[in-house]
């Protein structure tokens, strides 16, 4: 088995090389941090029971035998288990222990045969059929792009409530630099993605890294002096393993995301259609709340849909759902909100 390392490793090493030109000590420490990350002990994940499946996607049961059902919808871009990272660091477990009956959607791994399934088709052909396998309306919770897609689902099927976590909707509200970088990245790789029928995780990861290269190098440098069995290293390794193990997304979903949403802001302009219907967040017939992250570089709070109350969390895009601030910043106020609805 290969030693865990940042993915894609050649790009990370190039970022370290560039850092060395101005800060050789930071570069040296970053390489030391990669070694610590690779040596960190890892506990095997216990598979969750599959309660229903549609094609390659499945609903994983989170425990809880009574109480209202809750469905967690992750982004297409990274694995679902960031919402179920491990013992003591799992939103799924927290909901089960708080009197709910939670489920986690796993989108599965697409192949070239799935190339034509866009974002809207992921909603109509996968998310909605899985929702219908649950015997009553659910509390629907969508994270990141999963929140964008949850809005589309809630426009077509009754839900008990809709909760968004760090969800982008108005894509013209990204900074000019960030939006330009995303569009340039798409233009540079569009032909390869079309030929493959898929957008590999390496292309997605490199996009996120390039939005803040200094932070990517610095977070590894911060590990350099820690022993591999330190609890902080274990949390870091779990998150990095999650980020590095993502599946590709279909070419059609990538096209709809980068050209339709990021490029033309069809969602923000009220032009995005799902199942033939225009999706308007303010027209949803369900109580809705949006938990935004104050230090979010992936889905800044400014990109949130208008007309839905926002609850700020004192964290970043990933830290809001996992880590030391997640319980107080998100899990507990989320539980209160769900109980009230």
Image (cartoon, rainbow, N blue to C red):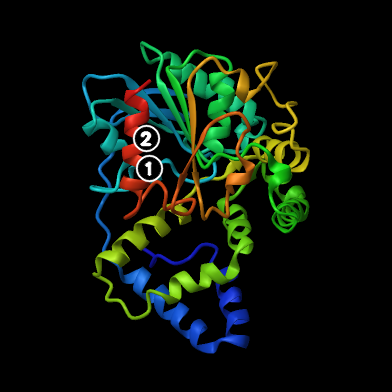
Q: Position of residue 3 (x, y in %)?
A: 38, 67
Query: Residue 239 has which mark?
Result: none
Which residue corresponds to the image point at 63% horizontal and 63% vertical from the top-left?
210
SS label for mark 1: helix
On the rendered image, what quadrant is the C terminus found in? top left
Q: Position of residue 303 (x, y in %)?
A: 63, 42
Residue at label 1? 330
User: Quick check: 186 above or below 259?
Assistant: below
Residue at label 2? 334
Judge by depth and name the residue closer to the eye, 205 or 248.
205
Label 2 with label 1: CB-CB less than 8 Å: yes
User: Quick check: 154 above or below 103?
Assistant: above
Left or right: residue 333 compared with residue 46:
right
SS label for mark 2: helix
Left or right: residue 209 compared with residue 142:
right
Which residue corresponds to the image point at 31% horizontal and 46% vertical from the top-left?
327
Residue 153 in view here? yes
Distance in Å between CA atoms under marks 2 and 1: 6 Å
């Amino acid at each position: 088995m290969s030693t865990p390392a940042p993915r894609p490793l050649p790009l990370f090493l190039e970022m370290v090389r560039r850092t060395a030109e101005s800060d050789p000590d930071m570069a040296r420490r970053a390489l030391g941090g990669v070694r610590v990350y690779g040596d960190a002990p890892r506990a095997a994940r216990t598979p969750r029971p599959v309660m229903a499946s549609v094609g390659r996607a499945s609903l994983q049961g989170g425990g809880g035998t009574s109480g209202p059902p809750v469905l967690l919808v992750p982004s297409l871009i990274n694995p679902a288990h960031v919402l179920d990272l491990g013992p003591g660091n799992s939103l799924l477990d927290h909901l089960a222990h708080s009197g709910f009956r939670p489920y986690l959607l796993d989108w599965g791994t697409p192949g070239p045969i799935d190339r034509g399934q866009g974002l809207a088709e992921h909603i109509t052909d996968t998310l909605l059929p899985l929702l219908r396998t649950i015997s009553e309306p659910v509390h629907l919770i969508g994270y990141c792009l999963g929140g964008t897609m949850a809005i589309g689902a809630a426009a077509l099927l009754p839900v008990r409530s809709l909760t968004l976590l760090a969800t982008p909707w108005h894509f013209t509200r990204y900074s000019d630099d960030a939006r330009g970088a995303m569009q340039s990245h798409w233009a540079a790789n569009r032909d390869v993605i079309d030929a493959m029928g898929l957008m590999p995780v390496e292309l997605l990861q490199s996009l996120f890294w390039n939005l803040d290269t200094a932070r990517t190098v610095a977070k590894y440098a911060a590990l350099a002096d820690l022993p591999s069995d330190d609890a902080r290293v274990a949390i870091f390794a779990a998150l990095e393993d999650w980020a590095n193990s993502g599946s590709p997304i279909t070419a059609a979903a990538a096209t709809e995301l980068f050209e339709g949403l990021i490029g033309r802001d069809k969602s923000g302009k009220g032009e995005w259609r799902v199942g033939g219907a225009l999706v308007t967040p303010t027209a949803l017939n369900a109580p809705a709340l949006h938990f935004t992250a104050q230090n979010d570089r992936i889905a800044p709070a400014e990109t949130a849909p208008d007309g839905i109350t926002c609850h700020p969390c004192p964290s970043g895009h990933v830290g809001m759902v996992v880590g030391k601030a997640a319980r107080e910043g998100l899990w507990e106020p989320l539980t209160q909100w769900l109980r009230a609805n």
